[in-house]
Amino acid sequence: MKKSALFMVLLFVFLLIPTQNSVRAQGENEMLICCDASTVDLYLIGSQSIKKLTPFVQELGDEEQTTSISTTIASQESIGIWTLDNVWAGTVPDSTWSFGINYELSEAGGAQINATATVRIGSKSFSAALSPGNSFLSQGEGVLNFDIEVDSFLVSASNTIEVELAAQTIVFQVPTSDSELVFKWGTEEYDSSLEVTIPLVDIRLIEPEIEGKDVYIPISIESPYGMSTLALTESLSLYVNGAVVSGDPIETGSGDLIRVTWTWTQASGGTETINVEIRLVFQQGRPAMQGSTSVEVTTTDTGGGTGTYYPPDEPLRTNGVGSRLNVDIQTEISSDSNGIVMEKSTELTIYDEMAFWVRWGLDHIGDDNPAHSSALRAFNSGGVTEDDRVSRFIEPVEVGEFERQLVNLGTMYITQGLGLDSKELIGDFKDFDAIDISLDLHGEVAVKPHPVTLTFSTVEHVQDQERLDFIRDFVVVQPAKIWSEFDLQIEITTSMMTGLTSTKLSQSDAFDLQTIRTPFYDTIILKGDGIEQDESFTLSAIPTTSLGYSPFVLGLALLVSFVGAFYIALKISAYRRKKVLMAELVLMPLSLLVYIFAYPPLFIGVSVALIVLIWWLTAIFSPRDPSLIQAAVTFPKIPCPACQTLNAVTTDQRPHRFACSGCQKTIKLVA
């Protein structure tokens, strides 16, 4: 009897233990406020081998997926089966589900098709055939549509949704050897989908937390899509007394459970009842899923709080929209006895959710909580005490420890924490001769979504006359974007004896590239604003200490070439007209522009040679100037008998009379 009683107790306890797919029990401080079954489009994605359904338009690709039929079908054949593994438990109401798939018919006058769309959920199955009016397909593109009647039933989290398109017969009209019917899906242009009405999400209101006049209103979001529910849905808003709560909420998460907390600062003080409403727009163009309730809050006018909720758990790095990032890189290239030296300063200015994550992590340096991400757990406490940690403010000792330890943890922190490719953005930490890291909190020490700037100052030697990639696409592309977009500014400057050549920006036209040369430096300037995370680009050039590429040597050679060449042209045209030659001085700035815009020495040499050739040809073929010739000839001179003034004798003709240049008396030469 005792054994039987013990067995019954154990069996009862076992039955009380929830399974992995059971709905989470509601806590005492939580209230379920949303949501019933909602209508949503499940898009067809995936290749031939793995066909899937997704509610997120962001998961549509750039290249359509296809299934083609080129022969007549006389018996039932499956065209494709698409599956959604993630289903939320609840009630599916009586509704009409619509299945539409894009097609293209080519090289035939038409096609007669008898097809069926079947939806299966667990043990339930619902089908619909093409209506007679839609059974004939004309040549070109179109959409096959099916309306599937679905009866009400309960769905569990272990169920999947499966839709199958099957053809019983397909007969081509006026066919050719190239007749083909192609079904297409997987892109925004070919957005084949299954419109369903199913449970999607549970939203619970958690009891608000109060600090002074700050009211922190949290909700929990549970769905089978986890972080994607927050990241890829259209919008999520909280309203208090009918007015939207502004400001970025703080997001934390654990598994499929997402907690979002807004800060409401409009309390009137004392005890009051407020109406809290949540609105979730799952897909663009669909009605908002919403729920509301009333809660009582008591606030005081004693200050407290920072205007931003401070979560006990690590905040999420993104709300799906992503944070802003500004990258400013200043690089100086020179030479020393060991070769070419590159000194680089990389400033990362971080905004929004990522700025909050960085600040929260700074305030938890040395916290060995296993729930924290590896990027935060890697830091040890160092000089940070328990009083400094989790104070909601960032102390100087926390900044100091962060800067000191990041020298060794930089690659891991940038890659795993910031979602950036450390090697492409900063460089290889193993190659640096020296590195210094500094953090700027922009005058705000509170843990809140206020910008922070990380500056990496590095020194390294690079190979002479080898192409160097100064930067490449460095954002690690993720479905839930950590970075919404980024601004990038790069300026690379050399010394007067070190040059850059063969500058190239490849794979992208989203940036403005300038190359400038003066006798004192070569400069490369790259700018881009609002760059998307998946933009591919590479900026490269060849640094060299060769004198032929030195900005100073090239400038000096250009000056000497022009001065010398023009001097020779003047000598050639000594007794010729020089108006055309002087006008051709305007050609010189053309060669100067080739130099200023940092073209290779070959281009500069060719431009100088062409200009010099034009000058010399002009000097050779310009017409002679008689006055210049006459001025250059030396004539014999005789004194005037009256005043003794010397007068030039310009002719051999005799007798020759001319006036004295002194006294104007006539002089006559007879021999």
Image (cartoon, helix red, strand yellow):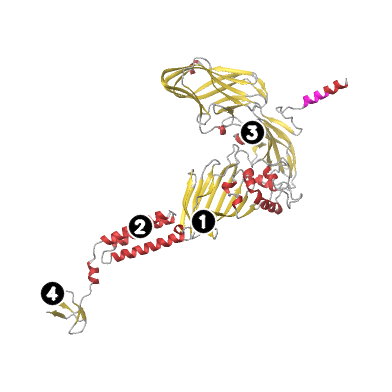
Disc on the earlier residue, 2 or 1: 1
The reply to whether discs 2 and 1 touch (Cβ–Cβ < 8 Å) is: no
Relative height, residue 290 to residue 495 (above, below)? above
Which is in the foreground here, disc 2 or disc 1?
2
In this rendered view, identify the residue nearer to me: 182 or 91.
182
Is disc 1 surrounded by few (<14), some (14 to 19) or many (20+) residues within 10 Å?
A: many
Which is in the foreground here, disc 4 or disc 3?
4
Is residue 191 part of the magenta span, yes or no?
no
Q: Position of residue 371 (x, y in %)?
A: 71, 40
Look at mark 2 in the image and give the residue it sits on.
609
In three-dimensional space, the C-alpha distance between marks 4 and 3, rounded to whole angstroms, equals 116 Å
Look at mark 1 in the image and give the residue it sits on.
493
Give residue 279's mark.
Answer: 3
Task: Name which quarter of the figure residue 94 lies in.
Answer: top right
- Residue 307, can we see it? no
Which amino acid is tagged 3?
Arg
Look at mark 4 in the image and give the residue it sits on.
653
